[in-house]
């Protein structure tokens, strides 16, 4: 939801009211298996406002401070209940003691729960005996309301409500749907609210946006009874390359305070990798690839629990089996063959157990879409003319030029002559060809001389000086002889 002028006024007034740090009292002995209520506004309205924390770019709430939790825990999560998070356009970044925990995830005009992992330096900072603080930044034009923030140590409250050892959550991706199943045993009777949140994660594992949520109030748990259920969520589209998903399951009390959490990660279903076989003329840094992600997405196997990995391999090949045919094509064009290399594409599909599905895996010789390779030329192949690329594919040699062929494949030389762009959809043996005249480059004239001036270089100047010295020597000898003749006559 974009910031309305009225919201700016409301946020300013709320910021003034909340200009002092909000501090929560902690129960003694908070540590492993504990929940720490960092902030709770006590509001119950369906919209943000009142004593909820309000955050905008120019009016952030004052840092919320709380005492150092006693004891230690191997893991911790910060659970934030927020209204109107328009991810991914809205970026509400959360900081614990100055350490970024990530961004809030949610949907426009809804209350959503974000579970942020506290690890590394952030987790260590919780246990250094000092006062802690939580702050937030929001990008321009957006506003968010925070109703509660709870620090969940070691998975949740210990010795009270749920048996963590027997609890479990599983999640699986099939096509464009995620099915999550939970199992939970209560240790005492109670009525709670349960909430699911499905988050999309990028290649670094950071939350990008929330793609699904479900909340159910007044769920009755019976002491000793095992509670089980499954929920299915539809994604907004096919999984992107390197995108993984996480399902968070949160149990809350009547005040929206989390008392128990579980999470399950679904690894990236689609992956794309480029492998370059390093050599003197074709090191790993000499090759870059674009367009592979779209190909990987198109070739992904949507079967339940399967992951698809696309791997492009680029390696130098100085003696391909098709060398004779490639040389014949180059000789026909009056060209010389330079860098030779192979490009191959392989698809590997693995099931949920990590085993390769042979029927769905194997080499891919041709695609419907293009992949672009940028390949740096070795120095021996630079400074030539009439560049082309020859390819042997299916027993036929094709010549790729700057003019696209019937498939749209082409090559292009960079303006500085140090690399080529190769846009192709077939994977075989490739050779860079060019016209090599063998002529030595013309000598560069001195910078202070015009090209049409006579050559007065060092060699010419040396010859002139030698001739001048010879003439002077001959004149001196003649003068000496004449002087001797005059003396004799006297």
Image: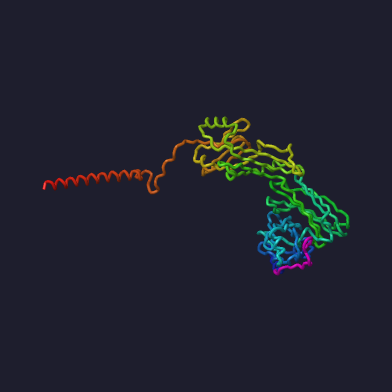
Q: Is residue 71 visible?
A: yes
Which residue is pictured at 54% across the width and 41% down the height? 377
From the viewer's perspective, tell me whether residue 477 is left or right of residue 209. Answer: left
For the residue pair 258 and 104, the one nearer the viewer reads as 258
Query: Where 136 falls versus 272 (above or below)?
Result: below
Question: Where does the N terminus fall, quadrant-wise?
Answer: bottom right
Provide residue 386's location: percent of width, then percent of height: 51, 37
Total numbered labels placed on residues in the image: 0
Above or below 372: residue 17: below
What colour scheme governs how the chains and residues are painted in the rendered image of this protein? rainbow
Percent x, y of residue 80: 75, 60
Residue 486, x across and y down, in percent: 14, 47
Residue 154, quarter of the rendered image:
bottom right
**Secondary structure mainly formed by the magenta segment:** loop
Q: Give the range drawn in magenta.
A: 19-35
Q: How far across and down, in percent of the image, does residue 45 sit? A: 79, 62
- Vertical comparison of 205 with 38: above or below: above
Q: Which sits in the foreground, 319 or 131?
A: 319
Q: Which residue of the protein is positioned furthest toward the left in this rendering? A: 490
Question: Can residue 420 be seen at all in this image of the molecule?
Answer: no
Q: Name the residue: 57% across, 30% down.
A: 324
Q: Nearer the viewer, residue 289 or 60?
A: 289
- Asked whether residue 24 is drawn in magenta, I would say yes
Q: In this view, does 422 lie above or below 255?
A: above
Left or right side of 330 for 488: left
Q: In this view, does 356 lie to the left or right of 387?
A: right
Q: Is 34 in front, or is 388?
A: 34
Residue 421 lies in the magenta-colored region: no
Q: Residue 225: which quarter of the image?
A: bottom right
Find residue 269 and report its image quarter.
Answer: top right
């Amino acid at each position: 939801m974009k910031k309305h002028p009225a919201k700016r006024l409301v946020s300013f007034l709320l910021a003034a009211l909340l200009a002092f740090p909000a501090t929560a009292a902690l129960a003694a002995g908070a540590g492993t298996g504990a929940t720490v209520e960092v902030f709770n506004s006590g509001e119950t309205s369906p919209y943000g406002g009142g004593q909820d924390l309000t955050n905008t770019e120019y009016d952030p709430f004052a840092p919320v401070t709380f005492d150092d939790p006693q004891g230690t825990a191997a893991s911790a999560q910060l659970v934030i209940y927020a209204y109107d998070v328009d991810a991914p356009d809205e970026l509400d970044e959360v900081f614990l003691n100055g350490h970024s925990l990530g961004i809030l995830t949610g949907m426009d005009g809804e209350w959503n729960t974000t579970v942020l992992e506290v690890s590394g330096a952030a987790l260590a900072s919780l246990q250094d005996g000092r006062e802690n603080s939580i702050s937030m930044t929001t990008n321009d034009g957006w506003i968010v309301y925070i109703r509660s923030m709870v620090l969940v140590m070691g998975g949740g409250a210990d010795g009270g409500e749920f048996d963590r050892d027997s609890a479990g959550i599983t999640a699986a991706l099939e096509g464009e749907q995620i099915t999550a199943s939970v199992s939970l045993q209560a240790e005492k009777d109670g009525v709670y609210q349960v909430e699911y949140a499905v988050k999309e994660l990028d290649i670094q594992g950071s939350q990008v946006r929330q793609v699904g949520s479900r909340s159910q109030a007044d769920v009755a748990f019976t002491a000793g009874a095992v509670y089980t259920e499954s929920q299915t969520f539809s994604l907004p589209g096919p999984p992107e390359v390197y995108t993984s998903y996480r399902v968070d399951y949160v149990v809350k009390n009547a005040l929206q305070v989390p008392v128990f959490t579980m999470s399950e990660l679904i690894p990236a279903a689609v992956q794309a990798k480029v492998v370059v076989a390093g050599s003197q003329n074709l090191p790993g840094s000499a090759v870059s690839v674009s367009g592979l992600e779209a190909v990987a997405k198109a070739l992904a196997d949507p079967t339940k629990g399967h992951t698809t990995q696309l791997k492009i391999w680029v390696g130098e090949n100085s003696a391909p089996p098709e060398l004779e045919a490639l040389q014949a094509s180059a000789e026909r064009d009056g060209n010389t063959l330079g860098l030779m290399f192979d490009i191959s594409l392989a698809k590997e599909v693995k099931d949920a157990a990590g085993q390769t599905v042979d029927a769905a895996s194997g080499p891919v010789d041709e695609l419907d879409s293009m992949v672009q390779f940028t390949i740096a030329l070795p120095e021996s192949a630079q400074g030539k003319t009439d560049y082309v690329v020859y390819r042997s594919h299916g027993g036929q040699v094709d010549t790729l030029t700057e003019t696209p062929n019937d498939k749209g494949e082409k090559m292009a030389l960079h303006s500085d002559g140090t690399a080529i762009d190769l846009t192709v959809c077939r994977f075989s043996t490739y050779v860079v060809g060019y016209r090599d005249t063998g002529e030595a480059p013309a000598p560069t004239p001195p910078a202070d001389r015009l090209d049409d001036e006579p050559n007065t270089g060092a060699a010419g100047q040396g010859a002139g000086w030698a001739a001048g010295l010879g003439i002077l020597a001959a004149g001196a000898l003649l003068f000496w002889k004449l002087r001797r003749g005059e003396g004799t006559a006297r």
